[in-house]
Each structure stands twice: as C-alpha cells, then as structure tokens.
C-alpha cells in the first residue's frame, strides 16, 4: 500500500529525509548522552547515499525552550562517526546557507540541516494541507525530488516536516518506518493467534484505551496486567488495594477510569488477567502477600510468585506478544523479579514480539533481553496510537495525497 525505498530511483536525486534524532541530552551541558536513534536512522541514510542520492536530513531535538533543546551539530558529527564518512551540517533551515548547501550537494553526499523545532511553524496546530504551505515546505520542497519519511517516532504528530512535504512531493517510507509498519501489521494478522498483550507500568490511561480497543476489535486473546494498570483493574473489580496504593491512583487522577475498567472486565470476562498475589515494600525489602491479605498499607511494587506462574502459563502458546510496560518497580532490584520472569518467558515462547515504551525498553536492556525481542519500536507515542487504532498523520498524509 505504501511505497518504499525499493520503488524509487534515487541516483543523483535530492532526497529530503525526515528522521527522528531526538535523543537524551544533558540539560546543563547540552551534551548528547545516547545515539540509539541516530544509529537506527543511519541505516536509511547510508542506503540513500549508497544509491546515489543527495541526502538532506531533517530532524528535531527537544522543544524550543525546553532543557533538552539543542542544535543538531553534535548529532551530525555523531552520524558522521557512525557512517565513517563525511556528513555536512549547516546551522540554517530556510536561509541562503541552507539553500546553497542543498544546491551544492553532490551525488552520495549527506547534509544535516538545523533543528526543525527552531521554527515556531513546525509544531503549530494546522491541517495537513496547511502544513504544506509553511515556509519550511515552500522553501525546501522545490529543491528536492523525493521525500523519505523515516520518523515513525514522530509519525503521530501532524507537524510541518512530518506531513507537509507529502502533499507536494513523491513520498516513500524509509527503512525504519517500513519495519515499524510491518511489525504492527504482523501483530494484527489473524494468523498470529493467540496474541497476548502485556500492559503494565504507570501509563494507565493509555493501557485502558489499548485494552478497550484491542478487545472490542478482537485483536487480543489475553491481556496480562501489572504495575498501576493492574492496580486500577483490581480497584474496578471491587478490591480494596489499600490506602497508600489507592492514594497513588487518586493523586494521578486515575480513579475516574474505574468505570471504564469495570466495563472492560464485565464485557470481556476472563480475557484480562489480574495479579493474584503481590510483592510489597516492607522497610525497603520485598515481602510477598496473598489476595486475602488485601487491603495493605504497604506499597505494592511487583506481582508475586503465583502471578508469575499464571502469566508464564498464558504465554507458553502465544504466537505474538506485545510488551508495553513492566510488572512493577523494575528500577529496584528487589522488585524486578516479576518483570524478569514474565519478559524471560516471552523470549522463551518463541512468539513474534513487539516492545515499546521507554520503561519497557529500559527494563529489557537492564535484563539483557533487548536484542532478543523480535522488534523494538522506536516510537512510544506513535506505537501507542497505532495500538489504539488511531490513524497516524504521517500515514494519513500518504494515503490522501500519494495516489
């Protein structure tokens, strides 16, 4: 349905490629602290250059005024080190320096332009059509031959650099974008059944929305819950989880989601698995309690042994698994046990696995399982919206204007 880099002859053509270089930056020194996303997108950029394209890279870092906002100079330098070839950089987007730098590009050369979020128009709320008439698109599109959208992590935002070029230029998917879409399609495939979703962590609102969508659209056979997501569902089931735990839900404004969670439990009886025992924080130490011990005045920080076994059994026959959120406070050694047991069982199951979300990825990395997951999504927000059945603006633009 979507054209990819295999469908275009890039030789001696100017390719404007939107990637997502947004990385962790030291708020004080503004020094780049990781290069994972730069490495990811280097695959697409390297292939474009190898195919003879004149590559113009657009990306963002932070938001104007935020602590992690910087120029893209060090990103360009890091990309050059990764590719082991010269990468040009110009501290400009719409001026003569940017225009001249693009015009002077030779076959196979790479140029990184300035942070697109240095333009206020980039993040302005506009329609896709309106974004195509912004200064960024009107200035750069006439200098290019093709637009390559590779920024899945920004695909859920209708920003000028994400959707505007698609209205006025031939558009193809970059390799990262292509892989993300294929992974999501595979998860949605009816052949990959049973499909098990792991919904944990602290993003409860998103967890409830995902659960409601995938169950109502027959996209999941079982949901395993952990973290605050599980605590909300337990509350919706009528269980008293204890004052300190209920207060956490209340302070985060999550108790208003209880009616929706109760509706899901009632409508899809047996499909949402909840913890049957728990690990609580007793003076900084792990202590396991049973359901009969609720309510507890101790903070629930993980699932217990019986729940681990229950969840592991559910995963044994899975053909596909979506991992979104840890089982508990994985940052603490005493409370990573549940996340470790469940995530290791996912890998052991040999199912096709997709993982997304910052805490999920961090937990996988901490457990040494990151590279054993079938596909780790680069886009937290975009993945969430896709799983909730929402249309990503970047794809909507392609479907509307690339016919």
Image: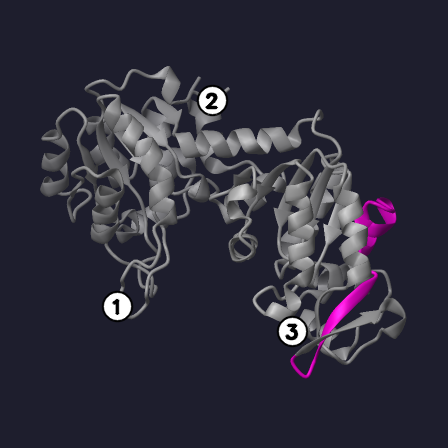
Among the two numbered marks 2 and 3 on one chain, the one whose residue lies closer to the N terminus: 2
- Can see residue 88? yes
Q: Which residue is mark 1?
A: 29
Above/below status of 5 relative to 17: above
Instruction: Report if residue 17 lies within the magenta region.
Output: no
Secondary structure state at the residue bearing disc 3? helix
Q: Quadrant of the C terminus?
A: top left
Where residue 8 appears, as percent x and y from the top left, is: 33, 17
Secondary structure state at the residue bearing disc 1? loop
Q: Is residue 199 found left or right of 141 in the rendered image?
A: right
Whole-number angstrom distance, CA of label 2 to CA of label 3: 44 Å
Residue at point 56% right, 42% down? 373
Q: Which residue is mark 3?
A: 251
Q: Is residue 48 found left or right of 292 in the rendered image?
A: left
Q: Which residues are magenta?
A: 262-284
Above/below status of 94 relative to 363: above
The 10 Å Cα crowd at callout 3, few under 14, some 14 to 19, many 20 or more, is few
- Can see residue 275? no
Where residue 280 appears, as percent x and y from the top left, is: 73, 74
Mark in front: 1 vs 2: 1
Q: Quadrant of residue 355?
A: top right
Task: Out of 305 and 95, give the one closest to the viewer.
Answer: 305
Q: Which residue is mark 2?
A: 2
């Amino acid at each position: 349905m979507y054209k990819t880099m295999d469908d275009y002859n890039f030789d001696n053509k100017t390719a404007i490629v939107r990637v997502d270089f947004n990385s962790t930056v030291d708020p004080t020194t503004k020094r780049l602290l990781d290069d994972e996303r730069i490495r990811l997108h280097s695959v697409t950029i390297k292939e474009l250059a190898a195919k003879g394209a004149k590559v113009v890279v657009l990306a963002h870092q932070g938001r104007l005024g935020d602590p992690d906002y910087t120029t893209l100079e060090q990103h360009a330098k890091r990309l050059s080190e990764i590719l082991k070839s010269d990468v040009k950089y110009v501290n400009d987007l719409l001026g003569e320096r940017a225009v001249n730098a693009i015009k002077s590009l030779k076959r196979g050369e790479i140029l990184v332009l300035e942070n697109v979020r240095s333009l206020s128009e980039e993040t302005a709320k506009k329609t896709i059509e309106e974004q195509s008439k912004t200064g960024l698109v009107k200035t750069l599109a006439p200098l290019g031959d093709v637009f390559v959208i590779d920024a899945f992590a920004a695909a859920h935002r209708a920003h000028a650099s994400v959707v505007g070029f698609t209205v006025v230029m031939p558009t193809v998917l970059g390799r990262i974008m292509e892989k993300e879409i294929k992974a999501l399609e595979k998860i949605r495939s009816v052949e990959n059944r049973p499909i098990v979703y792991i919904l944990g962590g602290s993003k409860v609102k998103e967890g409830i929305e995902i659960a409601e969508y995938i169950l109502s659209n027959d996209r999941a056979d079982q949901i395993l819950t952990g973290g605050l997501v599980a605590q909300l569902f337990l509350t919706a089931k009528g269980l008293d989880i204890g004052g300190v735990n209920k207060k956490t839900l209340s302070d985060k404004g999550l108790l208003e989601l209880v009616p929706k969670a109760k509706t899901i439990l009632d409508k899809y009886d047996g499909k949402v698995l909840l913890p049957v025992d728990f690990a609580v924080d007793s003076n900084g130490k792990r202590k396991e309690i049973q359901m009969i011990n609720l309510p507890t005045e101790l903070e629930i920080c993980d699932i217990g042994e019986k729940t681990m076994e229950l969840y592991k059994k559910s995963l044994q026959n899975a053909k596909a698994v979506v991992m979104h959120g840890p089982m508990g406070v994985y940052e603490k050694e005493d409370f990573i046990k549940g996340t470790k047991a469940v995530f290791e069982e996912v890998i052991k199951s040999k199912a096709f696995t997709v993982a997304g979300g910052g805490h999920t990825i961090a937990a996988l990395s901490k457990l040494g399982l990151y590279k054993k997951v079938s596909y780790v999504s680069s886009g937290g927000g975009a993945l969430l919206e896709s799983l909730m059945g929402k249309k990503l603006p970047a794809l909507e633009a392609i479907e509307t204007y690339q016919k």
